[in-house]
Image (cartoon, helix red, strand yellow):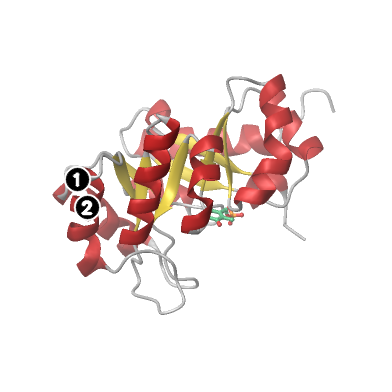
Amino acid sequence: MENASTPLDEVRANIARAAAIAGREADAITLVAISKTHPADRILPLLEAGQTVFGENRVQEAQTKWPELRERYPAAELHLVGQLQSNKADDAVELFDCVHSLDRPSLVGALAKAMDKADRRVPCFIQVNIGAEEQKGGCALSDLPDLLAQARAADVPVIGLMCVPPLEIEPAPFFALLDKLARDHGLAGRSMGMSGDYETAILMGATHVRIGSALFGDRS
Ligand SMILES: *Cc1c(COP(=O)(O)O)cnc(C)c1O
């Protein structure tokens, strides 16, 4: 079994293949390994294999798992991909290196305050409710210009847009729309694509793919 390829090897190979088809460099795409619900002993093998960027969706869970892991792997980078409550902004700014879920004016205010207090600017993606779904997080498409202007005015660094397209529909048109919105607003980052659709997302311009179950198996 020594040379058996791991899920991480396979995901990396798939990313490289999709990038090649798209005529892009594989290292223009950041693999964010989504380790939510998985304990530290499942995360360690990936760190040992050289994976550096990880994502969690809950501040509290990340606070219990990551300080120790980061002590052992100081190069590890931690991204927040889940909804953030304004009252957790201080904790988030302290713990995370990137936030993918900036979605409303009140959070811009809370993050700006937290970043001022910590004297640390954390790069953010604005999450867009790309399918205009009632239950989904993310700002409405029509609110994006104002939210972006507010973030820029508050010195909250916005590096791109993020989306989670509707389930059970072909995602490519939603990825194309996010790509266009990012271009229209002069943003380089596109956080899109999960275990089921990251190769499509890369073809449509993803710069960050957020992959959980393809790396760790199903979440119980
Ligand atoms: C859980 C999660 C992912 C990873 O999903 P998989 O289908 O397991 O790859 C990506 N993005 C967000 C926002 C998530 O909450």
Relative side of 72 to 26, left or right = right
* Rendered position, 143 above or below 3: below
- State whether label 2 is within 8 Å of ligand 1: no
Relative side of 110 to 66, left or right = left
- At x 82%, y 23%, the residue is 2
> How far apart in space, not on screen, are marks 2 and 1 (Cα)?
5 Å
Viewport quadrant of the C terminus: bottom right
Image coordinates of residue 191 in percent, x first then y, are 40, 47
Between 93 and 57, the one lying in front of the other is 93
Relative side of 133 to 148, left or right = right
Residue with the mark numbered 1: 153
Image coordinates of residue 140 in percent, x first then y, are 29, 69
- Crowdedness near tag 1: few (<14), some (14–19) or many (≥20) residues, C-alpha within 10 Å: few
Q: Furthest-right residue in view? A: 1
Q: Furthest-front residue in view? A: 117
Q: Furthest-bottom residue in view? A: 134
Image coordinates of residue 66 in percent, x first then y, are 68, 35
**Which label belongs to residue 113?**
none
Residue with the mark numbered 2: 150
- Ligand 1 falls in quadrant: bottom right
Contact between marks 2 and 1 (CB within 8 A): the answer is yes
* Rendered position, 175 above or below 71: below
